[in-house]
């Protein structure tokens, strides 16, 4: 979803302020992807394998689940430190 929007917007980027426009498009696409995919490791794995078809969903599923939980744990630890 968000990636196809990114690809479409990338094609529309013209000469001139090209680097800044591309950076803004990339940031917006990342925000959309995070909102869309959330913390679902299976969805992240499937989306990843669409871009890298040589990988199997089952092979990358564990990696994505671990990465998501590591980020979650890090966020929780930061919350505890703020208290």
Image (cartoon, helix red, strand yellow):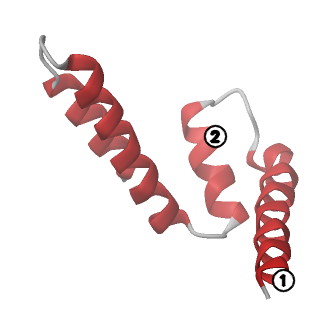
Q: Is residue 47 above or below residue 80?
A: above
The residue pinned by badge 2 equals 49
In this rendering, position of residue 52 left or right of residue 57: left
Of 33 and 50, nearer the camera is 33
Of 29 and 43, nearer the camera is 29
- Residue at image position (77%, 81%) is 82
Q: Report which quarter residue 18 is drawn in.
A: top left
Residue 16 screen position, x and y as percent: 12, 13
Q: Secondary structure at mark 1?
A: helix
Q: Is residue 38 above or below residue 61?
A: below
Q: Is residue 29 above or below residue 13?
A: below
Q: Earlier in the sequence, mark 2 or mark 1?
A: 2
Q: Are marks 2 and 1 in contact (CB under 8 Å)?
A: no
Of 71 and 58, nearer the camera is 71
The residue pinned by badge 1 equals 80
Q: Report which quarter residue 74 is drawn in.
A: bottom right
Q: Which mark is residue 12?
A: none
Q: Residues within 10 Å of mark 2 (few under 14, many from 20)?
A: some
Report, in whole angstroms, how far the alpha carbon at label 2 lies from the one at label 1: 35 Å
Of 5 and 26, nearer the camera is 26
- Residue at image position (29%, 19%) is 19
Nearer mark to the viewer, of 2 and 1: 1
Q: Secondary structure at mark 2?
A: helix
- Residue at image position (63%, 31%) is 53
Q: Quadrant for the C terminus, please.
A: bottom right
Q: Residues within 10 Å of mark 1 (few under 14, many from 20)?
A: few
Extreme bottom residue here?
83
């Amino acid at each position: 979803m968000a990636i196809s929007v990114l690809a479409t917007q990338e094609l529309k980027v013209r000469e001139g302020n090209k680097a800044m426009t591309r950076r803004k498009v990339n940031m917006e696409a990342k925000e959309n992807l995070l909102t869309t995919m959330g913390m679902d490791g299976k969805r992240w794995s499937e989306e990843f394998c669409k871009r890298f078809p040589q990988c199997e969903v089952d092979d990358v599923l564990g990696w994505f689940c671990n990465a998501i939980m590591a980020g979650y744990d890090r966020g929780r630890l930061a919350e505890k430190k703020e208290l």
